[in-house]
Image (cartoon, coloured by chain):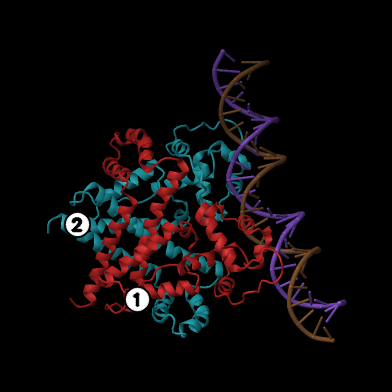
Chain colours: A cyan, B red, C purple, D brown
Amino acid sequence: MSNARKGKVDPARSLAILWRTREPASRSAGPGLSVDRIVRAAIEIADAEGIDALTMRRVSEALGAGTMSVYTYVPGKAELLDVMVDTLYGEMSRPVDVPGGWRARLEQIARENLRLYRAHPWLLRAETSRPVLGPNLLAKYDYELGAVADIGLDDVEMDAVLTLVLGHVRSAARAELDVVNLERETGMTDGQWWQSHAPWLERFMKSGSYPTAARVGTAAGEAHGAAYGPEHAFEFGLQRVLDGIAVVVADRQGT
Amino acid sequence: MSNARKGKVDPARSLAILWRTREPASRSAGPGLSVDRIVRAAIEIADAEGIDALTMRRVSEALGAGTMSVYTYVPGKAELLDVMVDTLYGEMSRPVDVPGGWRARLEQIARENLRLYRAHPWLLRAETSRPVLGPNLLAKYDYELGAVADIGLDDVEMDAVLTLVLGHVRSAARAELDVVNLERETGMTDGQWWQSHAPWLERFMKSGSYPTAARVGTAAGEAHGAAYGPEHAFEFGLQRVLDGIAVVVADRQGT
DNA sequence: GCGGGATACCGTACCTCGTACGGGGCGAGC
DNA sequence: GCTCGCCCCGTACGAGGTACGGTATCCCGC
């Protein structure tokens, strides 16, 4: 009942590990731990069992090590999460030749980010705003900025455009993954859930207090039931956002 | 180190409390608890000390009650959070006459939602996707849908437009509040943080590995330092999103 | 006015998790 | 061969959610 990340995060600590400033040689006996092995194990656990199952005890157990051994390589759980996040960034696809101009490039970036969130849902709860400046984050940022370079935007606008697109992806991914999670937790699909709540809702809907909500909610609910919902929200929103960006680009290009 | 919300949430439990199906009369002696008093106390704590400080022990203490007394009125912390969220929705402003058409109405909604997040930052960590169907959420949804009614959109599109706008607000609010939080936690403004990391960054920037990131990151960082950053991201993104929506609206109106 | 039942209230305790602390053991250099 | 340093880990503490089993208080019917 706190966030996936506690308050205390010392950036300097994370940086040293992220850039692997000091990588101790595995010398003594035992499991032969390393930052890499720990991070890989942690990612596997988070992928398979969710971020709530990611405890330090669980990680050490998976590595056949004592609970506290992990702390030799990682100052704490927050820093471990930082490294996990940066590691994922390093595994993203970054094609250089995407035909179709800035719009196609941004679309590709949006889809690749969505793919990442789908593959590692816990990422949504591990990322923080002030980013962890790991090597892979920088590479990601650099690559993604490239999509909107040389189309007439100034530097601040480039950053703003990228922030907007990625924000939308996060937003849509969160919605989609919440649906999946709830279906697993409750053993009930979204459609079934809406149906089970329908009588309850109707009671208040028919009171006439919420006329629009009743009509639209029902329509949206039915649409969701038709296995088209979060996916649709992503696509619809992405096209709207890109349309909006197109207005700025056209303006800057003096059309 | 988990979310603000654990896995187990029984919607039926929350519903009964949200709609105040059964409100026990305060009969016996003691602090004289009630769902309302508990929720108010919890909101005050979360507002003042953050959601991490919101523990059941802390709530009961604030009420001058024993730790477990709260459980007489609320099945658990998850349900308490549900009621807290719905209570906030109930306090939102919902003006009926906003001049300027759908665009002005959506802008107003976006700003009001942002205001709510600013006033109660913990809301960002308490909301879940599958919404808690409290009376105030329904009222909010109904009101907000009204902003895009009768402009040619079908029901599913209305829902999609609203989802998009609210998603953007959440996204921007999260960014903004993270900045504020980090400034408080680290005792360092965003500008100072960027400055303190500048030497570290430059080392890698100058390596030429991240040319665009170096230039744009610096520009964006300086802009953030000038106390214009999250606020700007909200405004910029909102206008882009509305521009994108305008395209659809124009199309539906057969312009 | 009195007995009984319901209901508000809460003390204690258990479980999980992060991690501080101090000690043990192995390898390498002198 | 001995010492130093680093890897590894057993134990334990503190925080937080909440199950359980009371105790106290009030209202009702008589």
**Left of B194 or right of it: where is B61?**
right
Local packing at callout 1 (Cα closer than 10 Å; few below 14, some 14-19, many 20+) is: some
A186 shown above or below D16: below
SS for tag 2? helix
The subunit letter for the residue under badge 2 reads: A
What residue is rendered at 57% in x and 47% in y?
A59
Q: Amino acid at mark 1?
A: Gly
Q: What is the number of the mark on residue A249?
A: 2
Residue at coordinates 51% horizontally, 67% vertically from top-left? A182
Q: How far across and down, in percent of the image, does residue A240 sit?
A: 28, 65
Q: Residue B212: image x %, image y %?
A: 26, 43
Spatial distance from mark 1 to mark 2, Cα to Cα?
31 Å
Q: What subunit carries mark 1? A: B
Q: Residue at x 26, y 61 (%)?
A: B240
Quadrant of image for the N terminus of chain A: bottom right
Residue B5 in view (yes/no): no
- Taking the image as shown, residue A96 lies to the left or right of residue D4, namely left
Amino acid type at image mark 2: Val
Q: Which residue is mark 1?
A: B146
Identity of the residue drawn at 47% across and 72% down: B136
Where residue B59 sits in the image (x, y, percent)?
Answer: 61, 58
Q: Position of residue B73 (x, y in %)?
A: 64, 68
Give the quadrant of residue C14: bottom right
Does residue A116 appear to the left or right of B237 in the view shown? right
Toward the viewer: A58 or B128? B128
